[in-house]
Amino acid sequence: MGRSRRTLPEELLLLALDPATGTTAQPQSLDLGLAGAQLVELALAGRIAPDGDRIAVVVPRPTGDPTLDCALELLRRRGAPVRAVNWIGGPRLGLRQTYLSHLERCGMVHAVAGQMCGVLPTTRYQATDNEISREIRSRLDSAIRTGVPPDPRTAALAALAHAVGLGKHLYPGNEGRSSRSRLRDLIRHDPMGGLVAHAVMDVQNGVGAQPRRSPAPAGRQAAPGARPAPEPARGVPMQPRRGPMARAVAH
């Protein structure tokens, strides 16, 4: 895989980076989105393919991108196809920082050290070339504005941006409501992006952690007074809970 094209995880991270604050929007869900973006990028490279709601390795040959190849090797070691929701919901601590450091090495962002309250160290990231971020954003804007089906890469980026909750960051307020709705609708234009985006939202809504119940045998009555378990809504990313104190490291 050549470096003339940015990967989908890189584009998603640049899209989430706030140029005014140097922090990323939706940091809690962004790690999930980056894990999903890796899957879509590997699919675009022909290394994996969807198999129902699972992901199967079809060509285990490395791509040349160390971070993607690490994910590809982990998938290969699974042996059998893995459910997308289980893969994305697995341990992904530090994936956002891994890509921030990668973008810094590539010269697309630079780190700015600082302090919060004059005591706690912080690190913020500024894009070195805002034209790159504007080009990524313009692809989404064009797809939303024209209604023309976008290419698979842009459709997947839109799906992931919606899944991690970037819609309100990109198109805020009441005036951005229709754009947020159209951003969500772009999910249908890329099957792999849609599969991964729904898996990201399912993880946030706790669906992946709940075992699927088999239907009751025919003729068997439910226990008196039993109530069916509620089904989490699909297509709407759950907003992560915020702790009593914001993280000191703003990246």
Image (cartoon, rainbow, N blue to C red):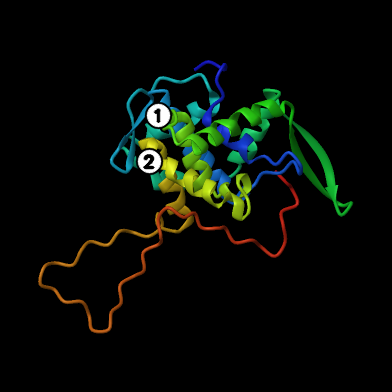
Question: Dot 1, how many residues are within 10 Å of its Cα: few (below 14), some (14-19), or many (20+)?
Answer: many
Give the residue at mark 2: 188
* Quarter of image, res 100: top right
User: As rendered, which of 153 and 59 lies closer to the eye?
Assistant: 153
Q: Earlier in the sequence, mark 1 or mark 2?
A: 1
Say what amino acid the circle numbered 2 marks: Arg
Mark-to-mark CA distance, 1 and 2: 16 Å
Residue 109 percent coordinates (x, y) = 72, 30
The disc label shown at residue 43, or none: 1
The disc label shown at residue 106, or none: none
Residue 121 horizontal side relative to residue 127, left or right: right
Q: How many marks do you count on the picture?
A: 2
Say what amino acid the circle numbered 1 marks: Ala
The residue drawn where x is 60% and y is 55% is 174
Q: Are marks 1 and 2 in contact (CB under 8 Å)?
A: no
Residue 114 percent coordinates (x, y) = 84, 43
